Amino acid sequence: MPIPSLGAAASGIEIMQTDLNTIGNDIANSQTDGFSTQTAQFSDVLTEQLQPASGAVGTTLASTNPSAVGAGAQIAAIQTDFSAGPITQTGVSSNVAIEGNGFLVVSDGGQTKYTLNGDLQIDANGHLATNTGGLVQGWAPGKPTTSPLTPISIIVGSTGAPAQTQNVVLGGNLPSNPSGPVTITTTMYDSLGDPVPLSLTLTPTLNTNGTATGWAMQGTVTGATANLWNTPQQLVFDGTGQLKTLNGTAVTAGQTSIPIDNKPSNYTWSGTAVPNVDFPAVGSQTAVTQFAGAQTLLVTSQDGNAAGTLSSYSIGADGVITGTYSNGGSATLGTIALAQFANPGGLANMGQTSFMSTVASGNPQVGQPGSNGLGKLQGGAVVGSNVDLATELTDLIEAQTAYQANTKVIGTTQTVLGSLMQVG
């Protein structure tokens, strides 16, 4: 006949071996980036009812409790803990750490998988990929986050388009007692990225005391057949040294722009677009002024650039990848997507720190990092394993003790059976 104690102890040994396997796997992956610790969960096996419950009979017989003997234990589940591990700065541009809720979405051999491992790299085709070859998914530049996901492409050394100059911003001081005209220079760029050398000359009108009462500004471009403006632009400052009028019009709050009248000849300018010469807001730190002292007027910035090559990139908290080009320009290269689940514990563990959705996890809810409950990203960093070695070593001792105790049950049962065989 079956001996329940043997069966129960055997089941205990079996589940403790599974527990040891789980703990051992956690310890082995204590240094695996993006690894999520697992814990074996137990439940008892269906019991044998020895005696049912009975009700009381008046005042002559009390009620009795049911009696049952268990048949051992079984594995109820292997639970995955997706709590965040420590974030480590790596300085590697392709690495990314998830701060908060969400998984990276990866296409791996035609299957969609999800991972917390942000130890990413750029493959031979310029795709952002996991170290096991999965292609990280997101959105191409200009695509809305509601559009289908595609692989993220970052091709270092690729050509960035030129940008035609739209704004030339001035700043600094024009001396109130000038010794003569002031000339400043800069380089603009046309729609093909060709350089356009620009000179702006400001000629003062002086009163009898040698103080400037106004300035006439004209612009020229090397090789051009006409000045930038049909007539010089007139600048007048007030008694506090602040810009008062441009071409007779009062300067109001905010930046003031003067469009040029004539496109530079011998250069390619798209459509009707022409650059503006901009004066920052009056009273700001970058405003054009007329104070006593040195001449410091200059072009503080212009927004055009020649064609360049992608030299570096960075990943923002919102998943946007920004590329920097050799010409000083920048552009969006794509946006990394994150996915979240109603029940992440229902994800199927596929190994290599990747998971797949199941009916238990629910469908993925995909979105941009930092939106709709999704966490943010930290570029140049990775999330490490969340294994707590102190906890695992404690669990290891407990599992070892339970394993040995179950073997004792088997040994004791054998001794009892041996004694029984000797009767008679």
Image (cartoon, rainbow, N blue to C red):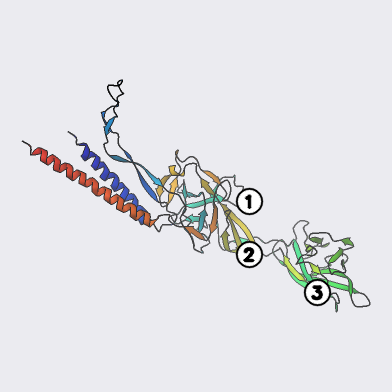
Q: Nearer the viewer, mark 3 or mark 2?
A: 3
The residue carrying mark 1 is 142
Q: Circle 1 — which element?
A: loop
- Helix, strand or loop status at disc 3: strand
Q: Residue furthest bottom?
A: 179
For badge 3, the amino acid type reads Thr
Apparent side of residue 364 relative to residue 274 in the rendered image (left or right): left
Along the viewing direction, whichever of 243 and 368 lies nearer the viewer? 243
Image position of 289 with respect to 27: above or below: below
Task: Relative to 421, say whether 216 is above or below.
Answer: below
Measuring from the top left, give residue 118's x and y in whole percent: 48, 56
Q: Residue at x 51, y 45 (%)?
A: 340
On the rendered image, what quadrant is the N terminus found in?
top left
- Is there any visible trace of residue 396 in the rendered image? yes
Gap in angstroms between the C-alphas marked 3 and 1: 41 Å
Is residue 188 among the parts visible in the rendering?
no
Query: Toward which corner of the image does residue 272 lie, by quadrant?
Result: bottom right
Q: In the image as oriented, which residue stretches furthest toward the right?
A: 208
Q: Are marks 3 and 2 in contact (CB under 8 Å)?
A: no
Residue at image location 87% in from the left, 61% down from the top: 250
Quarter of the rendering containing residue 157? bottom right
Q: Which residue is mark 3?
A: 183
Question: What distance separates the C-alpha of mark 3 from that of mark 2?
Answer: 30 Å
